[in-house]
Amino acid sequence: MKSTSRGHAMFAVGRLFRAFAMAGLIIASTMMARAADVSAAMMEAIDSGGAPAERSISIISPGVYKAVVTQRTGGGISQLFDLQNDPQAKQNLAFADRGLLEIGWHGAQYKVAASTQPAYDGCADWPSSGHNDLKATGDLQVIEQSPARIRVRVKSEFVWWSKQVHTDFTVSGIYTFYPAGRIISQVTVQNNGEKPFHWSSEYGPHLMISSAQTANPSGEPMGFGTPAHPEWKGADKAEELTMAYPTSAAVKAGLMITIPAEQQALFTRHMRHGPAGQLGWDRAGYGSNGIVMDKGYQSTWACMIQLGAAGSSLLPEFKAPADGLGVAADYRKPARITGAEVVTDDPGDFNKDGFNESEGCYVLKGPGPLSFAFAGNEGSAGLAPVFKIKGWTGEAPKVMSVNGKDMLAAAAVVDGSLLIELLGSIGADRVEVKVGK
């Protein structure tokens, strides 16, 4: 078994480096905002074009993952593939009719009225196939693309299944996709209508995955759990994360979702709505306690999804919910940076601590080169940290130095800021980091 594991690891490293070389990562550069330029870079964004019902944007991190955002669902991540173990992209981990990140569904008055007209706050879906049925597909746009990350903005309304559009009840989001299997989502919900919307406990960020009927007909491919309740039973009070982990040999990937610690004041509980295997999908994540969104209500929040994959030299492996605690700590309890200017007023940094929760990156300032100390909190994984360095005047570095050792990085200069992701883990200990020479 040891020799087999070693062989898989060597193969994974070789394939990863070949993918990076083919994709042009080793020649990290300042990016132009055109799809033709992106196609030769580390990450690739492909806009299919066409009518909203067919239009999609595919985001590819070679050898790591492929995600597909569809306009027909109002902007859902309808497909996600683990390219480490599924290089032909045949096994969709997301539920295609909605999306990997799902934030609504049942309201407080879910029961349909006696007439054919459903109760106003019985349901609010996003994303969903009902958006296409009701011609409420909204807007889909790539707003940033480089070897370091791709950002996609979506705008739409909530819908009541395929019955009606909540025209004045809007949802917009920005997905930020990073090379190392991380998706940061910033979501804004706004009620511009005359009526308040009363939610059930289901309002909040959830993972929505394919279940037995669609991913693995012979058995349940993935199970949901939290660190304290790995088999979900009893999961109620919000914890550090929710994880979908493989429970079948047919699936070698896992997914976790977490939120900034401060947002547990809003998303106070966990929720799950399946049941697995009966409907071809399963969904679980964070919920809330009957939030009422009155006229004029507006709220912006963020969450992080991390992909794990067996045999990857870059991604973590998620066999059980506890395996994600270190990665969740990276997002919920960011590291301390000293020795460089930390920017605390970047839009999307909710608590002004220099870590932008809406983009999943540390924000610094300086023309470069830049040296600083990076100290994680206890239990942190230090997995693939991302830095946005404003005012950068040099080229995008090919590597970062950690305690004097060069480590591979994905980097680009975009609008005067260096975006750079360390492609590796550095743990929780204090390290000295140098960017640029």
Image (cartoon, rainbow, N blue to C red):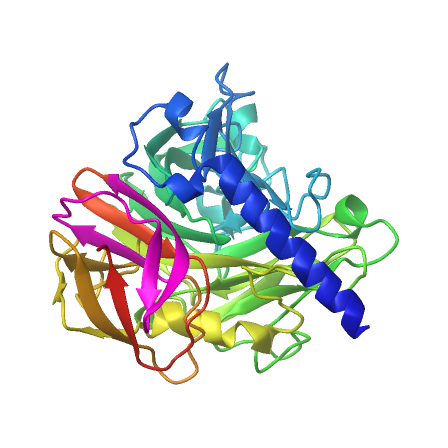
Quarter occupied by residue 344? bottom left
Residue at image position (39%, 33%) is: 156
Name the spot of residue 44 as percent of width and height, x first: 47, 34
Q: Which residue lies furthest to the top in this view?
A: 50
Within the magenta stretch, is there residue 401?
yes
**Residue range highlighted in magenta:** 385-413
The answer to whether 272 appears left or right of 249 in the picture is: left
Q: In this view, does 184 lie above or below 325?
A: above
Can the viewer see residue 344 in this picture?
yes
Q: In this view, does 144 lie above or below 437?
A: above
Residue at (67%, 70%) from the top-left corner?
319
Q: Position of residue 57 (x, y in %)?
A: 49, 29
Residue placed furthest toward the right: 218
Q: Is residue 273 left or right of residue 103?
A: right
Q: Does the magenta stretch include residue 365?
A: no
The quadrant of the rendering that contains the C terminus is: bottom left
Q: Could you say which is closer to the camera, residue 225 or residue 344?
A: 344
Left or right placement of residue 218 versus residue 51 in this view: right
Residue at 80% across, 47% down? 213
Looking at the picture, how far across and down is residue 373, in whole percent?
23, 74
The picture quadrant where one finds residue 330 is: bottom left
The secondary structure that most of the magenta stretch takes on is: strand
